[in-house]
Structures are given as structure tokens and as C-alpha cells.
Amino acid sequence: MSDETRRADDTGTVDETGTGLAGGDLLTRWRSVKERESFVILGTVVAVLLFPYLFARAPVVSEILQGYQSLAELMLIWGIFVIGFDLLHGYTGLLSFGHAAFWGGGAYAAGVFAIHVSGSPIAMILVGTTFAVLLAWVLGFLSLRRGGIYFAILTLAFAQMLFYVALQPLSNLTGGDNGLGIGGSTIEPLLGFIPLDAGVPVITMFVDTWMYMLIGIAMVVTVAFAYRVLNSPYGMVFRAIRENEQRAEFVGLNVWRYKLMSFVLSGAIAGLAGSLFAIQQARVPVESLFWTTSGEVVIMSVIGGVGSLFGGPIGAALYLYISNIVQGMSEVVLFTQIDKLFPGAQAVVLPEWASPAPYWHLILGLLFVLVVVFIPRGGIWGGLQSIGSRIGSRFGGDR
Amino acid sequence: MAVVTGPATGRGGGGGDYPSLGNFPIEGDAAVFGFNVPTTGPYSSEGEDELRAYELAAKHLNEGGGWVDSQFDDLSGDGVLDYQIDYVEGDTATDPSQATNSANQMVDRDGVIMFSGGSSSATAIAQQQVAQDSKVLYMCCLTHSNETTGVECRRYGFREMFNAYTTGQALAPVVAEEYGEDNSFYQLYADYSWGQTQQESMNQFLTEIAGWEQVDSVPTPLGTDDYSSFLSEAANSGADVLILNHYGLDGATSLQQAVDAGLKDSMTLLVPLYNRPMAEAAGDAISGVFGTAAWDSQIDNEASNQFTEVFQEEYDRIPSGPAQLAYAQTLQYAAAVERAGTFYPPEVIRQLEDYEYDNIGMGAETMRACDHQAIRDVPVVRGLPGEEQEQGSYFEIVNVTSRDDLWYGCDEGPAAECELGPYGDE
């Protein structure tokens, strides 16, 4: 920080044209503003509002992206899940391979509650999140006795246990392999009078439906909550544990309790995401408890950036984009897209092997490898930040 | 979830005032169908063949040919109700979550007016739910689980395929006559929706009709490569008959491994649900093995032969049972739209309910209104030995069990648990 103030002072005297002065001044202000909590929340609100419009409705952009509303919703839901996961992995340094337990557990709790008690979305979210909190408390209590790889394996084992319990013994409750069909008609309107598929007045063009509004609000609340926690002394302890657990212990902190709290917070956010998933899909597939779900969230987190709040949603969005849109992109679609970008290319007909669809797993794998090799610390978000600061330092007239 | 807001009435009616619902009215000049099949995963070979049949159906709807000219009087061969038929394809990867995502994409982004697909009951059930919630019709293709038109039935889904229950009903008398009455049997089943109902139904009817006794029934995970430990337990069980409730590549693998392990000499093998790609992959292993099949090109009647002919002309190969289902279901939907005079989903549904037909090569059928299940005949087949197999003929048809000897009432069996849900215009 002191480095930056010095730079801003310097530019005034060194740069004779004066443009550097204004630039440097703005930059300093920008740097101080962007760290503010209110700015972070406001930025999230704007991003959440603009995202579905750009992705699913904006004239040129959405056509190139081939996006659609329900995928935008899904991206946000997974984004929340990744933030929750990252709280534990990125900030406290505990790699869990069993986060499907909280995502799926929250989803099933919300779904079973909707079918047997009440289909109010708010109640479903509360039940799903509460269930995930309790589950995280128990699993955390059991798994946190070990660290490192043993912790990862323990969480994986517990999550797989839940998967098999949902698959067979509890299949009367969970629907077994068919998944739990909640049904769109079981889910009641928001607050009793706002149907989730109704348009939001005034900002319909941006967010479309109340379903998205609900998910968007959950996203903003999650970001605000996580930001507050991470920038409090409490969050500082999380990071201290990540950096050196022993040292934190010697300072006199109850490391085990902080780790458990981090696990519970992370589970709660994953449960919130799971409940939203149950509401959005009106169905809980049994795969939501399977280890592949735990694996997906790890991959999303690494792609987006471990230990960065906003990396998570970016990783989730990229992953889902490849697994849904690239997966269905035939050479014909690709050709039409290219033709829209460069009109007049009609003469070129793409051969069948040019279709990216069959290679979507490979594309995802390549992206993962590229991120791990080139931007291992911070993923895509970290990469964007370093590009940002490079541009910033050029503007700042640093010599 | 995906309500398209548009003009309140549409040309999609070709007349009549219907409100917008789901993806109705259609925007533009083409009605888009969605074909959501597994092109990866254990049922991919079935999915590939379904896709060929879907593409053929779309072609015939637009340009005429095949059943459009000969069997379906309602269809013109010049699109459907002034609309050309366009289609999008998706991959379910034989995975219910992926199937849901893919179906949502078709409904939400591509604006399909109907989608179809299946191969794996769990994916079909997941897609039926998307159909009901988004008020877009789903025509089931290959799904054999009792639950598809049982507890998981939906107003917006229709099934042409028979189910595990009727496979049991059709197979039990045939095997009782062939192998005698005092037998014990051991089952292996694919551990998901279909496999579970399939083994239940086999147990029920082999016990009731044939008087056999079950020794044990053991689940195997979907997509298993190595069945040897399951098979050796089966061999040591002392049972006379081994029933392999597996399908697709899994079915071919488990049957082949059972034969390789020498089980065929010590036990009688049964494969309740067969199809052509499976038989092709299993080769000589299927010799003498009884089962049922969705449809087969050897079923000799006008409609069957016509379909085989046009399919062969187009793709230079014999169509499988799932291909016939895919082709029939697409045309069935289009014909219902023509009869209704509109794409408005509730009217199309009413045209399909209790519709009686005899034009898809399986004899007289009724699409029952109470559970959206086609009440139809079931072919019982028996595998041919390797040297008698040739391109396109892997099994012989033992008999086509009449629908009068099969099925159940609307208040019995799986149908008793079915609640279809709303039409969407109430």
C-alpha cells in the first residue's frame, strides 16, 4: 500500500503533461474504493443484474454465447456452492472431497420438506440450509480429527455413505435412483403470492423471473456474508490456520474450533446452494450426492481461483458453459456462429470433425491443465487481477 | 420455468384462440423438435440408432415418404400445419442430471414444441418432469421401467414402449412351457429404476405363473465392466436359471461373460429385454436365450416391412427396436397435432389420450388415457446360434403375445400409483 501512495505522489512531479496526475489520482481512489465492503456488494448486485441479460437476452452477445436463462440460474447456484467450498479450501486450507453431502443433503432436505410439509421457497431454503449446518457439524466433528489427505478421504467416505443411503435404504423418501421428483406445481409462490416464473416488474429485461431474483439475492447475501467473515478477525484466523496451523495454535487460538466453524459455514453455504438447486430444478437427482459432484466443485474452484471470492462463480460459469453449451455445439451451430461474426464466410463448410461437441470433456480438461500450469495461484480470477494491475501500473505512470 | 411471452393467439393454432403456454405459440416458420438421446454412456448404441430414426421422421414429415405416405392418413408430408419441422439434438449421456440440463436447454433456448428420447428409464423420468413443469410435450422413446407410467407418470409424457411388468407376463408362460415348472432362479439386475422394477416383475410372474422359486436377486452398478464376481456367486447358488436384467452394452457384456464363464452349460440364461445392438455385440452368446424385444424387423406386416425398407435405404442398415419407437413416437405426435388442428399442448394431449391405432407394425393399440401407456402386444424372442446369425437377424420371434393376455387395469399394478397432473389449461 505504501508503495502505491509513493507512486501517486511521484507522478505529479515527474509527469509534465499532467495526464499522469489525474490518472494516478483516480487510480489511488479506485484502489481504496474497490476494497470497501459497500463497493464489493454493489459490484455484485450490478453483476448479478447484468449477467442474465448479457448471457441470455442481449442482442449480439447472447447470440454468440448461445446462452439461456435457466443456465444463467444454474451458474449462479453453482457459483454460491463454489464460494462455500472455497471458504473452507481456499481460506482455511482444508480440502474436502465430500461437499456433495451438503449440496445434496440440503437439496434433499428442501425437497422432502416441500413434498411433505410446505412448498414455500423461503421455508425450503431455511430447512435445506439448516439441515446442511447440522450435517456439517456432525461430519466436521468426525472428519476434522485428521488433516490433509486423511481429512479429504474421510469427507469423501461420509458423502459416499450418504449417497448409498439415499440410493437404497431411504429410497421411499428420496426416490432412489429416479431422483426426488418435487414437481414445479409443488413449489409454492414466493411469500405466498409471487409465482417464481412470473416476470419481475421494471427490471424484467435484466433478470426475467422471480426465480432468478431469488437466486440473485441469495448470491448477493452469500458474497456479503463471506466478505464480512473473511475480512473480520475471525477470517484472519482462518487464513492464519491455512498458513501455519501450529503457529496459530501456539498463539493460543483454539484451532480445532475455528476449523469446525469454517467447515460449518462452508456446509451452510453449500446447503443454501443445494436448496436453491432443488427449487430451480423441481427435482433432486441422486447424483447430487455422488462423489462426482464433490469433484466438480473442486474443479470449478481451481479454474476460477482458489482463495478468491469472485473466482468461484467464474469457475462455475465456465465449467457449466462447457458442459452444457459446448457439449451441444455441433459443427453446424459453430458454423452459424462464425458466419454471424464474419459475414460472408458462407463458402466454408465445416467438416463433421470440427464439431466441438464430442470433445467437451477434453476441452474442460485442457482448460483445467492450462489454469494449473499458467495461473496456479488464483486461477482465472487471479489472472484477470494481475492483468488489471499491470494495466493499472502502466496508467499510474510507474517508471 | 420457460414461459415464452408472445402474442396471445398464434398461427400455431392454424385457427382457434389459444393462450400461450409453454413454447406455444411457435415463433417463426418452423416447429422445432428436440431429440434428447444418449450418444455417450452405456446406452449410446441405442441412442445413435434412435437419432437416425428421429432424423428420418423429421425428413419424412417435411418431404413425405415412409409411414407418412402410407400409414398415417393425418400427415401430409409437407410439414405439420403449415410449419416445416426443424430439430435440435442433445446428449443425455445416460445420466438423469445431464438429461434434465439438456432438456431444459432445448425448452428454454431452442424453443422446442415437443421433445423425445430416452434409453434409460431414469433419464426418461427426469425428462418427463421437465415436460410437465415447462408444459412442453415429451414423447418417451425407450423406457421400460414400470414407474415411467406408474408412480412417475406425467400428463405431458406418453409411452409407446411396454414395461417390465408385461415382459414378466409375456415371458413367464413361454419359459414355463420350455423349461418345466420346478425351477429355481437367480437374478442379477442393473441397479436403477428399470432394473429394480424389472427384477420385481420377473420375480412376481415367474413365481405366480410359472411356479418357479427365487433364490436371490442381486443389484449390479450401471456401467459395470466385470461381472465375474457376481456371476460366480450366481453359479454357486444352486439355481437352475440365471436372469440377467441388464440392457445396452451392460447386457451384452454380462451375457458374454456369463457364457465365457461356462454358466450356459450349468444354468439356463434369460435376458428379459433384448434389442438388436445388444444381440449384435453379444454374438453367439445369445444362442437359445429367451427375452422380449421392443420391436423387430422380422415382425412381418406391412408397416414393419415399410419401415425396415426406408430405414435401410437411408442408412444401409437394419433398424433396431428403439429406432422404430423413435420414428413412431415422432409421427404419432405430429399426427395428433394435425388432428387437433393446433400445436396447443392440452389439445394435442387430448388427441393422444385413448387414441386407437394400428399403423406402427405392432397390431392394434390404445394409448390409454389413465396412465399414458400404450396397450399393445409384446414380442417374445429367442437368440439364434452364431452360425445362423446373419446381418440383421440375431434372434427368432417365438410369439407375439397378444395384448389381451397382458397388461393391467387403470386401478391395478403400476397404473394404480399414477397421477398424471394438470393439462395446463384448467
Image (spheres, coloured by chain):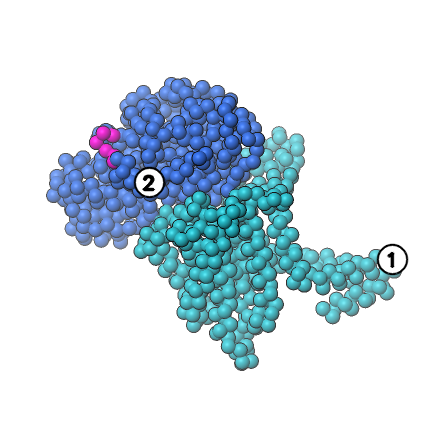
Chain colours: A cyan, B blue
Residue topped by disc 2: B418
Image coordinates of residue A315 in percent, x first then y, are 56, 54
Relative vertical location of residue B7 with respect to residue B264 in this rendering, above or below? above
* Residue type beneath disc 1: Thr
Residue topped by disc 1: A17
Q: Are marks 1 and 2 on the same chain?
A: no
Name the residue nearer the viewer: A379 or B87: B87
Specify the subunit that label 1 lies on. A
Quadrant where the image shows the N terminus of chain A:
bottom right
* Residue type beneath disc 2: Cys
Quadrant where the image shows the C terminus of chain A:
bottom right
Label 1: state its secondary structure: loop
Displayed quadrant of residue B208: top left
**Residue B323 seen:** no
Specify the subunit that label 2 lies on. B
**Residue A398 inside the magenta-drawn segment:** no
Say whether residue A97 is left or right of residue A206. left
Say which residue appears at 47% left-offset and 51% top-offset: A120
**Residue A161 seen:** yes
Boundaries of the magenta span: B403-408
